[in-house]
Image: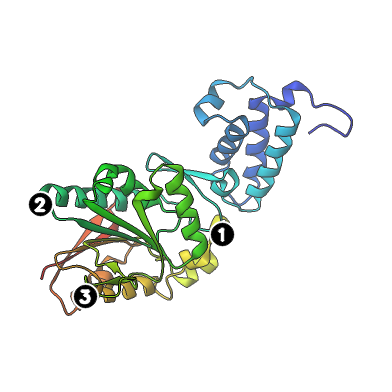
């Protein structure tokens, strides 16, 4: 930036110069992606995307906006996620508002959304029964939003009831904001609660929600040690959305244990997991007092990413 009382030369405010300086500063920080981070922040300062930025190196910012960019680079150098700095994350073709109230949606979770969409579509095609889908630990509402947009018509016609729950009131508030911003807020039931504790059989407590036919859950699956040792961005995200206990499976086990009483007969639970956890989750499901079929779906890297638990009784 220019000294006090003097304007910065136009060349210093050009996109190419801003990008070079931001990249150099970020390269000296702990971030592993300095060039990408710089492109995201500089393009955001221009209100454009990265493609535009690289095609218009001569375009300039005004000094006020350049000062904002400078502050963003400082924040990123300190480890704050780019998504929190910009206030959004592009995920599954959707622009999600994000902030420290909830975990930033990960690319891995797109597989969970895709699997859930295929599951619901197959059930809709099979018969005319109403489907109850429940996104547990919804966080920013990413998976619930993907389902609501894909099945907007079926939700409006009451062929599907979609519930999104979270134990954190702040996260649920963010989910509500994302659903409303995409025009589907009125199609999703938001519930504050721990896992599936609000589900009950028909004719029970009217405050209870119906037993789900489909459960989706991206629960914390990092180990406590991994969260404590993680550098940079993870330190800025809510720990309860990351920490799965000693082996990363504390909440996964609790959810699996709820399935005999909280999953409808013939229902399916889809759980996102971390590397190396597939066998342990399969063993947990196999020990349930109900008949189940368990399959593991790998991601593009060959890592088991989604566990499908089908109730067979």
- Residue 34, compared with residue 49, is above or below; it is below
- In this orientation, which residue lies closer to the viewer: 23 or 181? 181
Residue at image coords 68%, 28%: 17
**Residue assigned mark 2:** 127
Q: Which quadrant, please, contains the C terminus?
A: bottom left
Q: Note whether residue 203 is visible.
A: yes
Instruction: Give the label, 2 or 3, closer to the camera.
Output: 2
Q: CA distance from mark 1 to mark 3?
A: 39 Å
- In this orientation, which residue lies closer to the viewer: 303 or 284? 284
Left or right of residue 176, residue 37 in this image: right
Residue at image coords 48%, 44%: 89
Q: Quadrant of residue 286?
A: bottom left
The mark nearer the N terminus, 1 or 3, is: 1
Q: Position of residue 50 (x, y in %)?
A: 52, 31
Q: Position of residue 121 (x, y in %)?
A: 19, 47
Q: CA distance from mark 2 to mark 1?
A: 49 Å
Left or right of residue 255, residue 29 in this image: right
**Residue assigned mark 3:** 260
**Residue assigned mark 1:** 231
Q: Secondary structure at mark 3?
A: helix
The mark nearer the N terminus, 2 or 3, is: 2
Left or right of residue 49, residue 142 in this image: left
């Amino acid at each position: 930036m220019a000294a006090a009382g003097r304007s910065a030369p136009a060349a210093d405010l050009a996109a190419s110069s801003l990008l070079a300086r931001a990249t150099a500063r970020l390269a000296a920080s702990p971030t592993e992606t300095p060039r990408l981070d710089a492109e995201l922040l500089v393009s955001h300062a221009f209100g454009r995307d990265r493609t535009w930025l690289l095609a218009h190196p001569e375009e300039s910012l005004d000094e006020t906006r350049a000062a904002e960019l400078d502050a963003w680079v400082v924040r990123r150098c300190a480890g704050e996620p780019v998504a929190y700095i910009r206030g959004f994350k592009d995920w599954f073709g959707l622009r999600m508002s994000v902030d420290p109230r909830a975990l930033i949606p990960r690319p891995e979770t797109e597989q969970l959304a895709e699997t859930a969409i295929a599951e619901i579509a197959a059930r809709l095609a099979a018969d005319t029964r109403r489907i109850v889908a429940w996104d547990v630990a919804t966080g920013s509402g990413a998976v619930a939003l993907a389902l609501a947009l894909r099945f907007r018509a079926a939700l409006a016609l009451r062929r599907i009831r979609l519930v999104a729950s979270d134990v954190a009131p702040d996260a649920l508030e963010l989910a509500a904001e994302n659903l409303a911003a995409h025009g589907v807020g009125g199609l999703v039931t938001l519930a504050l609660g721990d896992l599936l504790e609000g589900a009950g059989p028909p004719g029970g407590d009217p405050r209870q929600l119906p037993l789900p036919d489909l459960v989706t859950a991206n629960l914390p699956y990092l180990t406590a040690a991994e969260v404590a040792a993680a550098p940079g961005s993870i330190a800025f995200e809510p720990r309860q959305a990351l920490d799965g206990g000693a082996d990363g499976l504390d909440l996964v086990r609790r959810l699996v244990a709820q399935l005999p009483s909280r999953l409808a007969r013939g229902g399916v639970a889809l759980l996102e997991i971390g590397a190396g956890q597939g066998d342990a989750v399969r063993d947990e499901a196999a020990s349930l007092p109900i008949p189940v079929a368990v399959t593991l779906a790998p991601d593009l890297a060959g890592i088991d990413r989604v566990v499908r638990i089908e109730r067979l009784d």
